Each structure stands twice: as C-alpha cells, then as structure tokens.
Image: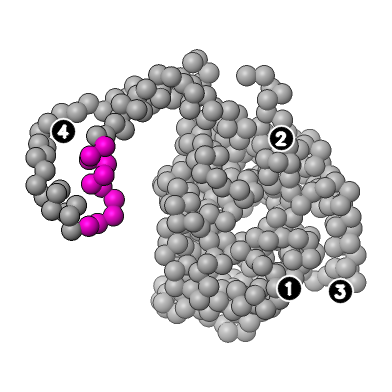
C-alpha cells in the first residue's frame, strides 16, 4: 500500500479539538512539557495536514475571566483563521469540569446556584458555538458524579441533569440554533463514579427527555474501554438506535485511567472493525480525534501525532475494502451466514401464523449444535490481512 493512499482530505471529515493538539503534556504527576500553541496556529497547521475542522470548549478559545472586548477580539481573530484556511467548527461544548466551582458537579451540584451558573455558562457557550457555525453540541459530565454516596441522592442528581438538558434543548429551539446534542459517557475519572457511565446508560437516559429526537450520543474509545467494554459494540448500538451524533476517536491500553492515545496505536483489531462499521453504516458526521500527543513530544511531535491519527483511520478504511474483496474471507462469511429462505421468512416480526408454524418445526438441537463454525480460521485470515501478509 503506497503511502500516498492515506493523505487526509477535508471530505474525510477529520476533526480535532483545540484541547487535543493544544494539550501541553501535563499529567497528575507533572507539569507541562511543551509551550502553548495558539488557536489560530492550530487551525492553520491542521488545515495544512488535511483536516476538515476544529472543535472547542468555550474556554479553549476564550479565558473564563475575559472581558467582553477581549472575547470579541479573540473570536474575530479565530473566525479569520477559519475563513483563511477553509476550516469548519462542526462541534462545540462547555468546560463544566475544570474550575473549582464545579468541584461537586455542574448540572448535578448540590448547590442550586452552581446549577444556575452551569446553565448560564452553557447558554453563553452555545451562543459562541452557533456564531462559529457548530451544529453539534456535546455534553461531557466529567464532574457529574460522586465519591460519597451519602452526600447526594443519585435519583435527584439524574432529575437535575434531565431538567438541565430539557432546559437547554428549549433554549436551542428558542434561539433557532438547530443543535443536535450528543451525550458523552465515562465511568470514572475525575469523579470516583460518574453518573450514566456508559453509552448504553446514556441511550436509556435519552428516552426520558422532553426532546429525545434532539439528543444522541458521543461515544469515546477510551471511555468505553475503561469499563472493559467493546467500543465497536457500543457504536453499533448507537447506530442501530439512530443516535450516533458524534464520535471521539483515540486509543487506550485496556481498563486503566483515561489515556487518550493516538488513534490506532494499540487496539488494532477492534478499531479496524470500528472504522469498517462507520464507513459502511452511512455515518456522515465528523471523525473527531479526542487524543493527545505523548508527553515526550515538542510541537513538531504534536503534528506527527495528528497526522498519525488520520493516517491510521485511512489505513483501516483501506483494510476494510480489502476485507470485503477478499474471496476466501467472503466465502467463509457466506458459509457461516447461510440460511434457507423458508427459515429466514419465519424470523422477524411476529404474526400468529408464524408462531404456529415455528411451533411445528422439526428442529434437532443435536444436529444444530454439530454444525461447524470456522471462526478461528476467519479470525486468523483477518489478522493476516491486518498484518499485511495477505
């Protein structure tokens, strides 16, 4: 495979957050290892690498204590950089986790005035996102959780969270912003336990909202893997429900702390099936990389990291094409999935006639159990293909 097959282009819809390539290499045990990269430079360099757009929290762009005049100047400079480069802002979100005011949550804080401040901050951030052209709004409740269950009734917290999202849906409608809201799950970190810890939990919660049609999910690779779950399966569930509004791509070394590694650097087989799913499902949203360069890197390394995320996605996309065109793999899949037409017709939606017919079928469980399923061979062929020996 020639390397020029994997040049990112805007039509691939690859996006990065200002907070991702702008990450300075801090961790809980060490301070920054590289200098700040300005938002305008981030836009310029990502455009040169072939990215489609850039996403942001409110305070990634505008300091939390900025004056109105400072805010307007910063936004004006940023919009000029977007216009000069042709870059888009498909998604925006609010930082409701960093400042000390959110030490007990934002929408789920025990303090009603903190909950009011969270609504105020989010509405202002939604205004900013709309000004920059964003149509997707992500909610990551990083502080919406607990360390001490005695301190907060989880039922009340979920009610407060629901009230906030219903309020903000109405605000988007009232302002004519046309946002789609995407909820992002994570099991823990920074809170000991974060409410609605998985994509499946978020999907259940969405059904209780006043405007469930406006709200979907933003699953993240590392967040599901922190729970020991299969990210490909989580995304498949979201797609099947019609709720995959956005996606965060990165990588992770198993169920540890949140690592935000370069996409495709660790979970090769799982992420191959993820990319195959996204490309074959008709998903049209951004492919957003919520990942950070290693702490060892300077700014040059950051751009190598960003290029690597996009390149790895395109490699997996090419491998998916090869998988679909591999005669031996497809013959195996045909054998595994083979079914008599009359059997297939009996499956699916219930009818009384079908039920009566199924009850009379002669189904020999011993014979059915004896049918070989060559999954070992299929999986090895997949590995051969991914490792480039087919």
User: Cα distance, mark 4 to mark 1?
Assistant: 60 Å
Q: Are marks 1 and 3 in contact (CB under 8 Å)?
A: no
Q: Tell me: residue 140, above or below residue 23.
A: below
Image quarter hosting the N terminus: top right
Q: Residue at x 89, y 58 (%)?
A: 77
Q: Secondary structure at mark 1?
A: helix
Q: Are marks 2 and 3 in contact (CB under 8 Å)?
A: no
Numbered badge on residue 124? 1
Q: Tell me: residue 386, above or below residue 390.
A: below
Q: Start and end of the magenta stretch?
A: 341-351
Residue 46 in the image, given as x and y percentages of width and height: 78, 42
Report the colour scheme.
one colour
> In front here: 348 or 184?
348
Q: Is residue 224 visible?
A: no
User: Cα distance, mark 4 to mark 2?
Assistant: 47 Å
User: Cα distance, mark 2 to mark 3?
Assistant: 37 Å
Magenta stretch: includes residue 250: no
Mark 2 surroundings: few (<14), some (14-19) or many (≥20) residues within 10 A: many
From the viewer's perspective, tell me whether residue 339 is left or right of residue 148.
left
Look at mark 4 in the image and give the residue it sits on: 369
Q: Is residue 356 visible?
A: yes
> In front here: 313 or 258?
313
Look at mark 2 in the image and give the residue it sits on: 8
Mark 4 surroundings: few (<14), some (14-19) or many (≥20) residues within 10 A: few
Q: Residue at x 63, y 45 (%)?
A: 287
Q: Nearer the viewer, mark 1 or mark 3?
A: 1
Marks 4 and 2, the one that precedes in the sequence: 2
Marks 2 and 3, the one that precedes in the sequence: 2
Look at mark 3 in the image and give the residue it sits on: 68
């Amino acid at each position: 495979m020639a390397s020029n097959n994997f040049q990112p282009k805007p039509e691939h819809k690859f996006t990065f957050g200002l907070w991702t390539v702008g990450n300075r290499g801090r961790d809980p045990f060490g301070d920054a290892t590289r200098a700040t990269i300005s938002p305008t430079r981030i836009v310029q360099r990502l455009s040169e690498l072939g990215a489609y757009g850039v996403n942001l929290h409110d305070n990634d762009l505008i300091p939390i204590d900025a004056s109105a005049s400072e805010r307007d100047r910063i936004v004006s400079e940023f919009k000029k950089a977007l216009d000069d480069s042709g870059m888009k802002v498909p998604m925006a979100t609010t930082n409701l986790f960093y400042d000390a005011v959110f030490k007990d949550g934002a929408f789920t804080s025990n303090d009603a005035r903190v909950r009011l401040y969270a609504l105020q901050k989010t509405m202002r951030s939604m205004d900013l996102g709309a000004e920059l052209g964003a149509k997707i709004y992500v909610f990551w409740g990083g502080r919406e959780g607990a360390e001490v269950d005695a301190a907060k009734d989880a039922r009340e917290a979920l009610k407060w969270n629901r009230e906030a999202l219903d309020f903000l849906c109405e605000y988007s409608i009232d302002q004519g912003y046309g946002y789609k809201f995407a909820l992002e799950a994570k099991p823990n970190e920074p809170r000991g336990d974060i409410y609605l810890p998985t994509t499946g939990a978020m999907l259940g919660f969405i059904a209780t909202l006043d405007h469930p049609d406006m709200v979907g999910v933003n699953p993240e690779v590392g967040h599901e893997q922190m729970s020991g779950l299969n990210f490909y399966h989580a995304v498949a569930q979201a797609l099947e429900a019609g709720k995959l509004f956005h996606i965060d791509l990165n990588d992770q070394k198993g169920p540890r702390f949140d690592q935000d590694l370069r996409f495709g650097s660790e979970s090769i087989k799982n992420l191959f099936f993820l990319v195959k799913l996204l490309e074959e499902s008709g998903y049209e949203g951004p492919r957003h990389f919520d990942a950070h360069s290693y702490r060892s890197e300077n700014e040059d390394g950051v751009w190598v990291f960003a290029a690597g995320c996009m390149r790895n996605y395109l490699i997996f996309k090419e491998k998916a094409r090869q998988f679909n065109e591999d005669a031996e793999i497809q013959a195996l899949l045909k054998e595994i999935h083979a079914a008599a037409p009359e059997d297939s017709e009996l499956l699916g939606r219930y009818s009384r006639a079908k039920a009566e017919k199924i009850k009379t079928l002669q189904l020999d469980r011993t014979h059915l159990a004896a049918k070989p399923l060559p999954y070992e061979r299929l999986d090895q062929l997949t590995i051969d293909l991914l490792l480039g020996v087919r």
